[in-house]
Image (tube, rainbow, N blue to C red):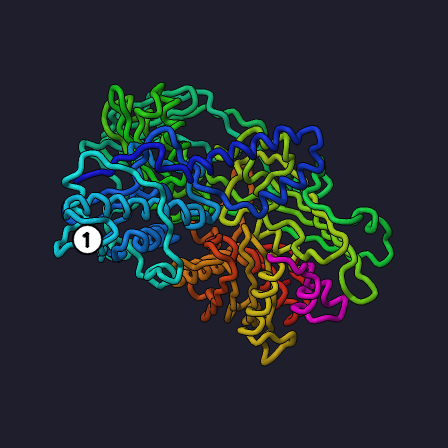
Amino acid sequence: MSKEKKDKKGFSRRKFLVRGAVGIGVVLGTGYLTRSIWRRGIAGMINTAESPYMGDTKTPPLWFEVTAENQIILHSPKVEMGQGAFTGLAQIAADELEVDVDRIKVVHAATSTGNIDGFGTGGSTSISSLWMPMRELAATMREMLKNEAAKALNTSPASLQLNNGVITGGGKAITYGEVVAGVQEWEIPKTPPLKDLKDYKFVGQPVARVDLADKVFGAPIFGMDATMPDMLYGAVVRSSLIGAKYKGADTSKAEGMPGVVKIVKEADFVGVVATSRMAAENAKKAISVDWEVDRNWESEDIEAMIQVGQGDPVEIQKKGDAKGLLEAEEGLITAEYKSPIGAHAQLEPNGAVAYVEANKATVMISTQVVEITRSEVADRLGFSKDQVNIVPTFLGGGFGRRLHTPNAIQAAVLSKAVGKPVKCFLNRKEEFQNDTFRPPTHHVLKARLSEDGLIETIEHNVSSGDVMFGSALTPGFLDPIVGADIGAWRGGMIQYGAIPNFRAVSWRVKLPFSTSWWRSLGLLANTFAIESFMDELAIKAGKDPVQFRLDQIQDDKAGQRLKAVIKAAAEKAAWKDEVVDGRAMGFAASTDANTPCAHVVEVSIEEGEIKVHKVTCAMDPGIAVNPDQVRAQCEGSIIMGMSAAMYEQMKVKKGALTPTIYGPYQMALMRNAPKEIDVVLLQNDDKPGAVGEPPMGPIGAAVANAVFRLTGQRLREMPLQLV
């Protein structure tokens, strides 16, 4: 097996991107003194930002390997958690490398390869952030192979032909594998011109997933499947109570139990290492832990905290004089909306397999943040980062739950204590209770209509717990500068730019339990509030809700793309603003990470329950690298959004979050899924955009708006339940 040799000269694109990220930090710092203006500017920038690849340029990272069997191995810095990133990246690379997709094998890049994306995998950026770097890297590698093949074939590079890993010229042929076998030192050329999109064979086509066979045949690819030779099993004692602090433990009953190898006491936790998982769990239950708890929280306490008006407001969007125009009571239209605490509820609990030796550590783990996990393990063990190798696995569900995986630290500490590999996973109850939850929200919207029935002024206030701030992924310097939590107000801005006066205000709340990233962040809750209110305003104005929106969209590029998806969804669904044969349609639209999306849902009421029959989704993600995968992402996002909007909620009882198992934590089942999801893809941008999260935005509001037409009940609180 041969690896290409690289130097810094070959990564000018990546260096530019890293410098760009640092530049944002400089802008934020110099703007601190005028932070009200800067906060709105930063908010607008972040609301539409597309995160670049944030790899390290200090050491040459390994991207491609060419084997003697003429297979190309792509080491992906993005993890595969079901979104199809591996397939999309293989398609992009295949077109520039002049090989078929099935000649490329995609694997997770371990940290030992140097190919680490500091941003991690999230924010619907896997394809968009690597679109240009992957094309440039593959094209450069293609030219390197051609140049060396020309030497071997004694001809000029310009005379060569490339076809699926075989280079021909001068009446001779040589494979990529044969080329690399004869090269010791590589010359890296300047990045060549990239192919025109019309010349691509695979990008834009519905290529079958490269990970399909492994998943169909149950290959051991997930974190729960990971093993190491001579492996033991670990378990950590965790409190079920909110805010519990570990003070100490009595382990005397556990120490002599069958299978127990060692009880490990640390300053912040106590754990067990045993010969089996059952033995470790049994011993864990026998440990008596002293927990310090300040308060036994209840749901009512949390609801009282999440209220617009509590704390300090941060204005994140402003046009005109919305605040002043909304002061008078006459003609004022107001509404309130709420969303509950939500769990990730992914199938695979968090855990890791770790092996700590004298001067190195290896951790196999399902994680979205490889670099952060490596840094945290290294810090805890007192190692340098180069001594820690994180080996990512496939994720049995991510959705933001694995944007912080400190469980790797616990597995590593347990392994170090016994000198052997240790596998340590949370059980299902622990996974629910120790989740980093989607925070509850409270929204107050106000508006005033003009004489012609359009919106003269509108204001959105949202109170929420943190999403991004306090997480391992967010730089601490952003907190005092931005003020409002960036993730909590995702989707919370007014997208109807032709309205003369509008304002968005964030009310940040510090909750006593962990809240963080959840698929689409604040998009689902914020869009539910804004788009439900838009429906109410359209009805007040006596206008069709689709046309009402179209009339108030600004005529710039973003506005044109939003108008296009609204029209496409309405046309494809044959939109009707009336009840027909016991069914009604509801409409909603949103723009997330530069990707506009619109939904039309068709709903009936059956035995007192809301039944969604059909969802028509129109979305414009720019270039759809794999249209089938984009449609699949839309379908999955819609059903997950329906589940969250119609069924899911966590409660707080006697100081603990509940429920802790599937079933009591109600989710959408197969019988609740719509029989038809019709996806219309527009491509009005010259690059790929966000896909996995934007379709989450409109679904809750679209369902609620349809229910109003059927029943006259305005559902302003998720989960949506008829009275």
Name the secondary structure under disc 1. strand
Q: Which residues are magenta?
A: 533-557
Q: Quadrant of residue 588?
A: bottom right
Give residue 281's quadrant in the image.
Answer: top left
Q: Position of residue 197 (x, y in %)?
A: 40, 59
Relative height, residue 40 to residue 377 (above, below): below
Against 620, residue 24 (above or below) is above
Which quadrant is the C terminus positioned in? bottom right
* Residue in view at x 22 percent, y 53 percent: 160
Q: Amino acid at mark 1?
A: Ile
> Which residue bears the numbered disc 1?
167
Q: The N terminus is located in which quarter? A: top left
> In the shown orientation, is residue 269 left or right of residue 49?
left
In the rendering, at what x and y percent does residue 174 appear?
14, 51
Magenta segment, principal secondary structure? helix
Is residue 7 something one can see in this rendering? yes
Is 554 inside the magenta-drawn segment?
yes
Which of the two residues, 507 or 7, is positioned nearer the viewer here?
Answer: 7
Residue at the limit of the structure toward the bottom, as seen here: 581
Q: Is residue 276 left or right of residue 552?
A: left
Q: Inspect the magenta stretch and tell me whether residue 593 lies in it.
A: no
State the count of labels.
1
Whether residue 605 appears in this view of the structure is no
**Which residue is drawn at the image coordinates 58% and 66% (left, top)?**
564
Mark 1 neighbour density, 10 Å: few (under 14) some (14–19) many (20 or more): many
The location of residue 369, given as percent across then percent down, is: 41, 37
Q: Residue at x 70, y 47 (%)?
A: 504
Q: Looking at this view, is 454 or 115 the one in front?
A: 115
- Residue 519 sits above or below residue 547 on the image: above
Q: Quadrant of residue 195?
A: bottom left
